[in-house]
Image (cartoon, rainbow, N blue to C red):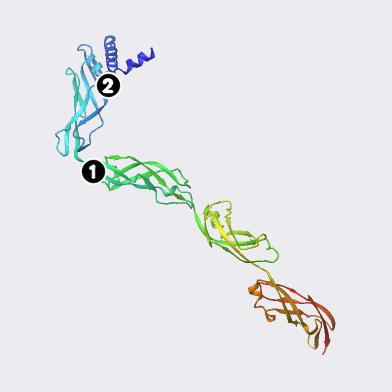
Amino acid sequence: MDKILGRLMESKWFIRIFALVIAILLYLSVSVDQRGSNYSAGSNNFSTTVEDVPVEAYYDQDNFVVTGLPETADVHLEGNSSIVQITKSLRDFTVYVDLTNAPIGIQKAELKVKNISDKLKVRIDPAVVTVNVQEKVTKEFSVEPEFNKNALEEGYTAEEPLVEPGKVSVTGGKDVIDQIAYVRAVVNADAPVNETFTRKADVLVLDKNMNKLDVIVEPNQVSVTVPVASPSKTVPVVIKQTGSPKEGIIIKSIEPSIREVILFGKKKVLDETPSIEIPIDVSNIERDTKINIPIKLREGITAASPETITVHISVEKEETKEISNIPIRYNGLAKGYGLSFVQPVGGETSLTVKGPAHVLKDLQADDFELFIDVNGLTEGRHEVDIQVEGPEDVKWELVLKTAIIQIAKT
């Protein structure tokens, strides 16, 4: 049963007959809708208004464009109540304007109606319209994307938006096309924006006064991608050596492949980050080594460029050299006293020096200063520590760590 009813409802003739039956029943029962209608029982005359009837325009649409035409019109009907009711129910008449032979330019045109009973008195509102007939022109324009940067989260920046497609075809009257000053796609986004996003945007065609123009745009929507970059800061790379090299191994140098990195993240955290520290554990390094170390990011830092740093570690074997006959100086001896060395005899001793071969090669006794501090010591024999000052890039060990001295009055 449902299938039969469905087929009947799809039939145009069934709908018309059904509407006719309803109209006749309404007429016979003298129950007429009073909204916007007038009925005279003595004359069997009836009037009503059919609102929002689409207006059709007849003209050469391949070569011309018509503007100023209303989309709909109201049709006032007056006549035999049965015919009026049927006409209103079916709405199968057409309101149109014939511009087939209209000249180019602004002009008055009369709205007409067809496919309606000649027994009815018909009035169209509006009866006359002002239209502009123009030569049809299609022109290609680049689309300018527009984004309100005030929607960005603090510190974030928006790069140049990308539009796809970048150009659209605009069709309209020649005089309207000549008025085009801007073709824009305005992108809206909920604040705060802190990442790249893509939105569909309507294409707006505007004149120099930012008034929207009545044209056809193809396509009328474009896809706009707004690249959003987080705050960034360039900071130096600081190498921090951790651990101690194995016995006999000297860390000659630790060199990062780059001296600076770019950090991305929250502005406040970036302001509190003066550098990026790269820890290097040398406890297992035995030869020249190249290692890739990922940059560890503190909370609030979202990314680093590059993400890893290559570090070159150069090593060399530690060698030993003994330097002999280094004199020992003394400091702080009081006036009227003399000092002599009991041990080492002659006041000279030796150092065992460890370091890189290229450094040890040129080391001599006068590169080191050995001294004892006798300040405050009185007459007699004393044992004091021997102190050493020497180059920073070597290690040393005294053959004799203390000296025995004799202090006497002179």
Q: Please identify the quadrant where the N terminus is shown.
A: top left
Picture coordinates of residue 116, whole percent (x, y) = 20, 20
Q: Amino acid at mark 1?
A: Val
Picture coordinates of residue 345, whole percent (x, y) = 80, 83
- Label 1 belongs to which residue? 176
Earlier sequence position, callout 1 versus callout 2: 2
Q: How many marks?
A: 2
Apparent side of residue 28 relative to residue 291 in the rendered image (left or right): left
Picture coordinates of residue 269, whole percent (x, y) = 55, 54
Residue sitting at x 78%, y 83%: 347
Which labelled disc corresponds to residue 251?
none
Name the residue furthest bottom. 410
Disc 2 packing (10 Å; few <14; some 14–19; many ≥20)? few
Residue sitting at x 63%, y 74%: 358
Picture coordinates of residue 391, whole percent (x, y) = 66, 75
Q: Amino acid at mark 2?
A: Gly
Displayed quadrant of residue 400: bottom right
- Label 2 belongs to which residue? 36
Q: Secondary structure at mark 1?
A: helix
